[in-house]
Image (cartoon, helix red, strand yellow):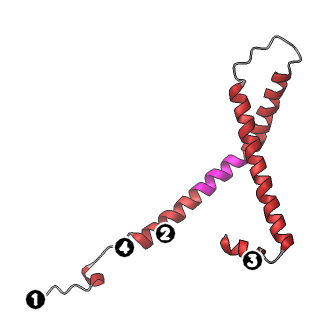
Amino acid sequence: MLSTVKQFQGKKVGLGRMLAAALAGLLLFAFLLLSSYFLAVESGHDCHDEDCPICFCITHCENVLRQMTGDLIPAGVVSILFFLSIQRLFFHFCCLQEDTPVALRVRLNP
């Protein structure tokens, strides 16, 4: 990722697009987080009116979360499993090498 950032440092248009994409991602995350927070806060709402604005906001937040997380959850699970498997393979091959007498160059005969 660092090489990608260094690649775009000379190009102002590419860097601007990358920053805009990062900002859009952060705004989407904040919107999802605040929608779920609003649902948690207003979960015990007692409504007596037919055109209640709080009930309208609750149904709107539920629909947004249902639509957005329908695609995000499987993609998130797959990406997490992928990165964990890559990390495990890297850790296994790079860090867990057994120390054998041959690798340590230990002489066993007197």
- 26, above or below 59, in the image: below
Q: Which residue is mark 3?
A: 7
What's the distance in space between the residues labelled 3 and 4, CA to CA?
35 Å
Q: Which residue is mark 4?
A: 97
Q: For the stretch drawn in magenta, what is the main secondary structure?
A: helix
Kind of residue sitting beneath label 1: Pro
Label 3 close to label 2 by CB (< 8 Å): no
Furthest toward the right, the residue is 51
Q: Which residue is mark 2?
A: 90
- 72, above or below 95, in the image: above
> Mark 3: which secondary structure?
helix
Number of the label disc, if any, that sits on residue 68? none
Q: Position of residue 22 (x, y in %)?
A: 76, 58
What's the distance in space between the residues labelled 2 and 1, CA to CA?
38 Å
Q: Point out the stretch of residues depicted in magenta.
A: 72-80
Number of the label disc, if any, that sits on residue 110? 1
Residue name at image x 68 percent, y 28 percent = 40
Residue name at image x 75 percent, y 77 percent = 7
What's the distance in space between the residues labelled 3 and 2, CA to CA?
26 Å
